[in-house]
Structures are given as structure tokens and as C-alpha cells.
Image (tube, coloured by chain):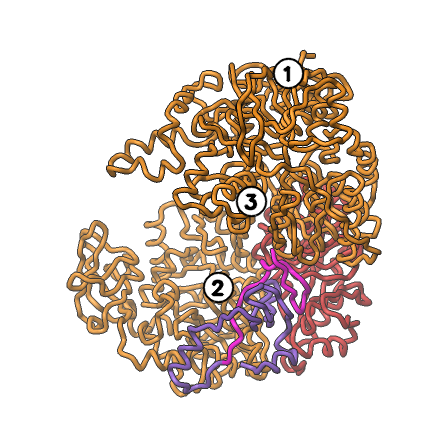
Chain colours: A purple, B red, C orange
Amino acid sequence: MKLMPCPLNGPRNMSEFSYGGEVRVRPEPGADPAVVADYVFHKHNQPEVTREWWCHVPTSTWFIAERNLATDEIVRTYLPSDPLFAEGGTP
Amino acid sequence: MRASFVSAPLAALGATPTPVGEALAFLRVPGENAAAPVVLTDLSPFARTGFKGADTASWLAARGLDVEPAHNHALRQADGSLLVRLSPGEFLLLGVPGAKPGLVERLDAAWTREANAGLCFPVPRQDSHAWFVLRGEKAPALFAKLCAVDLRPRAFADGAVAQTSVARLNAIIVRDGAAFHLLADSASAEYLWACLIDAMAEFQGSIAGAATVAGFGGA
Amino acid sequence: MSAARLPAPFGRLVDRERSVTFSFEGRRITGLAGDTIASALAANGQWMLSRSFKYHRPRGLVSAAGLEANALVQVGHEPNVAADRRAITPDLDVRAVNTFGGLDHDLGRAIGLLSRFMPVGFYYRTFYTPRAAWKVWEPVIRRLAGLGTISPKAPHGYFDKAYLFADVAVIGGGPAGLAAALAAAEAGAEVLLVEDGPVLGGSATFARPEPNGVAAVEALAARVQAHPRVTVLTEAVCQGLFADHWLSVTQGNRLNKVRARSVVVATGAHESPAVFRGNDLPGIMLGSAAQRLMRLWAVRPGREAVVLAGNDDAYEVALDLAEAGVRVVAVADLRADPGSDPRVGAVRARGIAVHAGTTVAEALGQDNHVAAVRLAPVTGPGTFGAVGEPVACDLVAMSVGYVPATALLTQGGARIVPDDATFMPRVEDLPAGLFAAGSVGGVWTAERVVEDGTRAGRAAAAHAGHACPVPGPVAPDGEGRTWPIPVFPHPKGKEFIDFDEDLQVHDIIDAAAMGWDHIQLLKRFSTAGMGPTQGKLTNALVQGLLGRVTRQVAPRVGTVTIRPPITGEKLGHLAGRGFEPRRLTALHHRHEALGATMMVAGTWMRPAHYGPDLASAVEAEVAAVRQAVGMIDVSTLGKLEIRGPDAARFLERIYTWKYETLAVGRVRYVLMLDETGGIIDDGVAARVHAEHFYVTATTGGVDRVYRLMQFFNAQWRMKVDIANVTAAYAGINVLGPASRAVVQAVGTTVDLAPDAFPYLGVREGEVGGVPARLMRIGFGGELGYEIHVPASQAGALWDALIKAGAGHGLRPVGVEAQRVLRLEKGHVIVGQDTDSLTHPLEASLGWAVGRKKTDFVGKPALDILEARPQSRRLVGFALDPAAAVIPKENHLVIRDGRIAGRVTSITRSSTLGKVIGLAYVEPDQAGEGTVFTVRADGGTLVSATVVPTPFYDPDNARQEM
């Protein structure tokens, strides 16, 4: 049972969390259909450190985890209010 | 009058509710042993409230409350209530069980839409959550059968708060001296009550009435 | 005391003062308290325990430690019991498995005669040609297969789970584990020590006291048990090591979920058998098994023994046997030079013949037990020379080598590599926080094992945050303990290399010759290592043989992965207490008191109907609502508070419609899409204040909606607060022409006059003295008030409404009737009338989409979908109630022999005297009056006609009164 370090509650069993997909930039209104379809259906999904949305279900806290998809190592986690989130470009 | 969320199981034990202020509470339970290795008590009818939003901490401080800077911590207030900071912007206030109106009632009356509290809004903790308290030296061992967070004294200090899953329910656990407050979905109260009773059988646990809780404020 | 019992100090686990009687195969057997089933049987001369899996050969103890399926028995209702680990209790009913007519007279013995016709993997190529052959063979195979019986009458056990927390978890209570536990505890760590046997000490519990430092180990065990920071679990098995040092440990009927900061694996090594013709006879066992029988249970393992040696430990076995009164006829030492270790000298000094460079070529049996062996000189790896005359014996003790029990280490991510110096795999690449101690890590001699355990314990404590000086590594010293691949193929076969699966040497050789020459392929084709003990005793031998046969070394041949569980968990362990949350509304017990038939609705319980008969109850409840007044508990409805300066703007970005211009006191439908443009939820938004909306969602969807709202606002960062208050408020829907009168009668501060409180309005006030929000919405199609009150005060209000409504014919109304009421109005239920692809235009919900809005969740996708020609439409239909067959939900719409759609909702409407429903049809079938065909039960085609919705009160006059 893997541990996920929740930025608010500390390390907790993975069963307390729900996965919310890769952090992506939403297309602007009026974007090309191909861009919209890519955003909705495709995933980047490479064996590298990837920013992902996760939710701590008991507190409904959404946060970002940077996870290595090849090794499953969680590098760091932070809240969306953390400057680290904006650094990566807000969706 | 506020009914308990576990009236039916308590009535089945032969207990009858008594009005205590606005609360229709079970003060005594036949066969109760408040000195048992683990003791379960329902405090659901007693006053509690909650507020959340980015401006909540300052609104509460402006009302004279002692606000804990760290989240996932609880701080006792002057009137005996327990102010629990769940997150930087979310607070839960557990009143002293009893008839005497205290901080909970004062804050609920103080908040109005016109009061311009900024981003600070009331949360109906009185009805959204059931409130149980567990006491006794075996309480951490009982929790270990239902909950993945280490609640032993060396890992979970007085005033510590855990927001986690208990018997597959989202729950809030607050350590208050030797006791643990447990709050979870009110609709699941009877289910959780049954899980707790099953888990405490191993420790010869006992169900006791609210009058056995330290600091109980009577009628 | 039987002649087979040894005197003290042998038998440290048995109490000679207390005998225990049980039955085996219907015979009474008397053992001693502390005996296992197997040791008690052995003491009574019963050495055959089972019949083998395929050939029904007699089988007995090999390890006496639960490492072979030979010792599996059925105890009463319980299958899969390891007789060599289960303690006897009075009146156990023990039976052998895999026999027809009992162990002694097993009719299955005849199968052994057919072994020629059962080459490895034969079942892949037989039994199904011709196809009909399988029908004949299947019942036969079902009867023949399986080791044990599952009884439907087995009483339920109480199983549960508990968490355990530790700084350092030490797995294995032998010398290395004890030293590690003590060292970690003394460094300040909280230690959990897990030992699978009944007492601490590991191999020191049955080994010869010197040179194994047994006294020192016993002293160590006492110190460990006395230490306040050490928790010891005995008869506890660590079944697996998972991510972040989470371990599952079964003890009795409990599954312990252990979370540790660091883990020391000190699981030791399994002694390994030799493979020669007849090696599966009862009485042929590991040297350690003989020592266990003697030292733990005071059982003399035989009268005349031959010891097969591949190391010096075998000589300790020989000395132990001699001192226990067993005549050691000979020691056959595989090594050309047994060396000059004092133990070898001591054996020779007793006059015991030692034959260097010699193996057992064949074992001969009589009366289901070994009776003699034939020795032969070793001429090369796996080959022997001229076979000698039979040497009488009733015990063969094999001490030829070991396999480190590395399973937990590999599960933790360590690598196992072959070691040509020791012929035992070596552990490499231990990840941070995982430590190996003792023989599992290659350290064997007594004092160095303790030193190694201390090192590992300190290192583990330091990793867990208790700083302490950590000694350097202890060099491995396992050379000479294991003879490489003691497998001696015999021209006449019957050399068993996997007891559980009844595999002989030639089965492995033949499989490799067929091309299954990688261990992973060989394992699956031959089933080697796939039996109940997962090949713990024999995987290394199979791998070694494969390597020898293919002339490859182990890395090419591959390694087998030992996955959790290590010994096997019961399904009860995994199920535990089975927590299934069940939510009750505040009115639950009142529904039960009113005779409601309750139903499960997601995690909630709701009243389906009141009274025992569904059809008549639904008809009466619908009629009450249409003609008088009904009362529905809608407490399970999702409820959200959306508050703050950006509340309206937030709703506009989440939902499809417009809310900025919604007046205070007004209610509007909400529709939510996902980013593919599909409908995911709906409800209403009631604006109770400029900056406060009370929004409802479906019972099953609210948690997801709430989580999505938080998700989006985490990115949009609008000044809005979202709260999920579903359980805080009970909802009572008072519905019907007399509803206004009833609410008035119960007393309310809200002005209920139609112009003061019109349809689609929301008001706050008190009803029956309880603070309430009232909404007038249209789900049921009648005048009605949906009253939301705090859950703890709902019961009182319900009681008051029942009383006030008595004079107006008020009936409680359940979920089934509510579904009819809403269908009569043509309302869509998200998830029933919509699927994950349904977008608003398909469901005639385009009116709920704000066309001038620039953005909301799903808009980009919706724009694309709406620009395309539609593929289906949801329409209302009616059909003749006298039709012979009435279709059901999800019955298909058939057009020209192909599927053109499906029925999503359908019901008999007594109000309308018709059968009505909703269905997806093709766009050109959507016109009013179109007739389409539905295929009902039995393939009957039924005609339906498209009619406009609402079916009932199309002008909505009744709900807007």
C-alpha cells in the first residue's frame, strides 16, 4: 500500500486518494476541434516525471503530485496555491 | 429539539433521551461502565458548528477566539469549547456538551449575510456530522482496527487532528486529553456505531451516556 | 509413552503430562499437548500422510516445516491444513486428502500404473479430441483433481484486520532477527518482531547446541521478549512486503496491516532435498526435519538411518540421531573429500561408516515406507557409477544444501543473483530501508549471524530516524554449505523433483526438449513450482537441472518470482469484517414503522413502496399524489451551498445555463456536462441571496459533482466557497393538490399564496417550528413544496405533517411511485435516460444550454458535437396497455433488422391508462406519431408510437397552481 504525501495531511495510504488525470492546459474557447479532442482524449503518458492532479477524498483537497511514471516515485506534492504550480504554467 | 443520529440503537439498549437545552440527549445508558478499557459515547445532539473560507481565521479572531496557527490542530477556548482548525481556512467548533449556551451559539448568531464576513461561511456541522467520543486506554487499539492513521500517544499528541478514513467513511478524529472525538457523515451514524461496537468487543468496551463525559454541563 | 518418544531434553514443545486424543482417517490417535498433527502421527508410527497429486504415491514428511504439500490434510470442514504446523487439540477430525477409499487403500493407486501415459503437460494435448471427449472426461477430472473438500456447511469464522505501526519491522525470530530486534530497540526504535513458529529461536530451537550457540540464542530471545519497545508476534506469518514498507502479517484469524519505517528480513534459509529414484518415499526427509522431530516433539524419526551429506551440517544430524538411539548405518557424503571438520571426526569416532564421493542412487520401499537404499559413487554432476547392494534402513536424512528464503527481499525490490562460490543465490541492490540479516543474506556461522543481525538492526533504526552508530557489513560465509544441484537422474525414473505437482526429472528434461527452456516457460508448461507450497523446496533444483540440461547458467535460464502470499491466506483474512457503509435518512425508522419495503439506492436505504405488494402500493401512492397529497422523503438528494461574490459566475462556468440574471427567490434547472460534452448530472439552483445559491444534484452524482467543482475552482481560483451539505438537510416533498393546505395546517412563516410563492420559487422560513427552505419545482407534476430542514429536526416535522395531512388523505410515497410520477411528466433521469455519450440536444435538453455563454465545462466539445448531424434522439412514446408483451428498460428498438435505439424508461401509467416511456430512436423516427418497433422478451416485436412530452398535464397547469 503506497503512501502519498498529502500537502495538507501528511503521508497517507493511497486508498485515501483519487486520481484526477495529468495536469493539462485547457484550450481557449473557440479552439480548433483537433486541439479540443486532443485535450479531452489523449494523455501524454511518458515514462518520466509527470504532474498529476490528485484528491485527498476525506478532505476534498485537490493537489498536484509530481510522479515518475516509470518508477512510481512521488517526487513532491503541493497545493494549487503554491507558487510551484504556477511555475509550470496554469491550465 | 435535536434528535441523536443513533437514537434507535441506544433505545434498543433501553436508554431514553432527556432534553438538555436544545439537545435530546442520552445521558445514561443501562449497563454503562465509564471505566472500561474503551468507552463509546454519543454526543450528536450537542452544539457544534463550522465555518470555512479564506477569511475565516481573521473573522474568528475578531470575535475573540483563540485561533491555532497550525492546521490539523485543536485549541481549547475560554468557555471550554474546542476550536479545531481542519485546514488553513476551515474550522470546526465543538461546544461543551450540556445545556449552557456557549461559543457555538454566539458565533452562529453573529454570522449573518449582512455582517460582511468576507470569504467566511457557516458549515452545518450540527447536522452533517455525527459526533462520538471514545475514551479509555484501548481507544488507540480500537481505532487501529478501523483506521490507518497511528493514533497512539507518541504519534498523535493532545490537540492533534487526523482527517482520514474510518471504517471506509470520511472522518475527523481529534485528540482531547485522553479522549478522541470522532466525527463522520451523520447519515452513516448507525453503520459507524455498529462498526465501533463490533471492534470494541475484543476489549470489553462499554457504551456510556453523555453525563459521564468530563466537563458535561448538565441541565 | 510410546516407544517412538525420546526422553527430555528432547521435545521442548511437548508436555508429557498432557495427552491429547484426536482422530486420523477415523482412527483414534493419542499425542501430547504441543504435538503437531504430523508429529503425533509419527509418534504413533503413522508416517504416510497423503497420496500424491497425480500418481497417488504414498507421501510423508520432508521438511516437517510446512514446505511440502505431502503434509496437507483436511481437518473437519477446513481444507489446506499443514499437518506439520497445526497443533493438535482434542477431538480433531483429521483426514488425508486426494484419496479414494482412504489413505491406506486408496483406489487411486491404480493411476500410478498408468504413469507412462501421463507425460509432462499431457493434459494440454488430451481430453478434447474429439470435442465430445471433454464431456466424458470433465467429470472424471473434477473428481480426481483437488486436495481437500470445501464444505458448504462449514461454520463461518470471525476474521478481522488491524493496523500495526512500527519503526522497525523484523521478519524472522531466529538468531539474526533477535539480534536485529534487540539492537534496534536499544537504539530507541519501536520494533515489531514477526515469527511464524510458536517459539522464538529459529533454527536454534532444533539444532545441535554446539557449534550453533543455542544457549546464547535462548538468552537473546529472553532479552528481546523483556524489552519494552519490542512487540513480538508468534505464529504470525509475513505474507508479503508491499510498497513503502507495508507488510501483511496473518496471525490466527486476523490480518495485520503493518506499516514500518524500515524492515529487516531475517527469514533464514530452507534446507533443500536431494533428488534420486524413490526419493518421495515416507521416511526420506531433510536432516533438519529429523532434528525438528527429535528436539521439538521428542519423536524418534526411525530406527536405522542413512545420512546423505553434502555439507558438514549432515554430521550434526548423524550425531543427533546416534545420541537419540537411532542406528546410523552409514553416511553417504557427496563430497569426494568430506574434510576434517571435528563433526566429521566425531561421527567416524562412533564407528559410523562414512562413504566419500557417494550418493544414494535409489531408495526402495515396502509397506509405504523406505526400507533400503542403494548407494553409488558420484562420477560427475548428476551422474553415478555402479550401484551397490541394498542397505536396509527406515530413515534417510538428507543434508545437502539450502535455499535462502529471499521472497520478501525480492518483493521489496532487491535482486537475486546466482553465486558460483556458495551455489546459493545472493541478494543485491537492497533498496533504502530494507535490510537482510543472517543466512538469508549469506551469513551463516553462529557468532557472525548475531553480529550481522545487530548491524542490520542498527541500520534499520537509523533509517527510521533513531541515529546510532552502524557497524560495517559482515562478510558472507556460506561456502561449503550447499552441494550444487544434487539431482541424480535414474534410467528407471521416479526421481521426484517437485513433490506437490508429482514431477519427475524426465518431465523437466522432456519439457526443455520441447522448447520450454526458460524457467518461466518451463514452470507454466510443467507446473513445477505451482503447487500449494509454490516450489519452496524445489524451485532451485528445477532451475539448476534446467541449467544443466540446456547448458546455460541461471541468468539465461531465468529466475522464478515468489509473489505474495508466502504461505497462503484464507479468503476470510482478505475479507475481514467487510465494511460496507450504509446511509440512512433521518426518517428511516419512520418508514420502517409505516411498513415500507426498503431498497438499496447506492449507499443509501430508501423506501421503495409502503406495504408488501409493489403494484398495488405504487398505484395507490401515485393516485394519492395526483388526487390528494403524498409525502416523499427526498433526503438523499445531493445538496451544495455555493456562496461568495463569484457564486453566479462560478455556476455559469460549471453548468450549461445562465445564472447571473436569476432573481433572488427563484429556482432554475442546472445541467452539468463533462469535458467530452456528455451529460453527467442535473438538479436545480435556488438563489437564496445575491451571493448564495442552494444547488441540488442527483443522489448518486453529488459527491462527484462536489469533487469536480473543487477541482475546477482549484484552477479558476474564483471567490466562491463550495460546501457539500447533502447529509445535513433532510428533504420532504409534500406533493399534490392538497399540499398547500397541509403545509399551511402544520404552520409556516412563509406566505404560501400563489402570487407570493409562485412555481420555481424558493423561500426561507419555518415550517412546523423547524427552520426550512421551501422550493416549488416540477419533478412530480403537481402543486408541491420540497421542504429542506436540518436532519436532526426532520423527524418532528414528518410527524407533524402526517398528523396535519391525515384529514387530506396524505400517504407516504416511495421511490417506485416517484419514478412513475416523473415519467408521466417526461423528466429525464441522468444515468438512466442518458448514457455517458448523451449530449443535451440528443435528450431534448438544448433549452438548458445558454447559447450566449462563452465558456462552460464541456462547451468546446459540445460545439463540435452539435455541429455534426445527430445520430439519435430521446423521445416519449406510448403503447397499448393491452399489448401481450410489455417491453422493459433497455429493450432494443429494431428497424429493418438492425438496432436503431433502446428503451430507457417504461411504466404502466394508471393515471393515463397507457404504457408510456422514453426511448432513443434514430433522428428521422423522432417525429410525433411515428411508429417504431421494440423487441421485447422472447423476441416479440411490439409497436410504439412517438408522443410529445409531458405525457400528463402538457400545459403544466397543475404544478404551477
Q: Nearer the viewer, mark 2 or mark 3?
A: 3
Picture quarter with the N terminus of chain B: bottom right
Label 3, label 1: how far apart the Cα atoms are: 46 Å
Dot label at residue C574: 3
Around disc 2, counting alpha carbons within 10 Å, would you say few (fewer than 14), some (14 to 19), or many (20 or more)?
some
* Callout 3 and callout 1 share a chain: yes
Label 1, label 2: how far apart the Cα atoms are: 80 Å
Picture quarter with the C terminus of chain B: bottom right
The residue nearer to you, when weighing A18 against C476, is: C476
Residues at badges 3 and 1 in contact (C-beta under 8 Å)? no
Chain of the residue displaying label 1 = C
Where disc 3 sits, the SS reads: helix
What kind of residue is marked 3?
Leu
Q: Report which quarter residue C677 is drawn in.
A: bottom left
Chain of the residue displaying label 2 = C
Q: Is residue C51 left or right of residue C823?
A: right
Residues in magenta, as a range: A1-25
Dot label at residue C637: 2
State which tag comes first along the sequence, 3 or 1.
1
Question: Residue C145 location in percent, x, y?
Answer: 41, 31
Q: Report which quarter residue C295 is drawn in.
A: top right
Where disc 1 sits, the SS reads: strand
Q: Which residue is mark 1?
A: C304
Around disc 1, counting alpha carbons within 10 Å, would you say few (fewer than 14), some (14 to 19), or many (20 or more)?
many
Label 2, label 3: how far apart the Cα atoms are: 34 Å
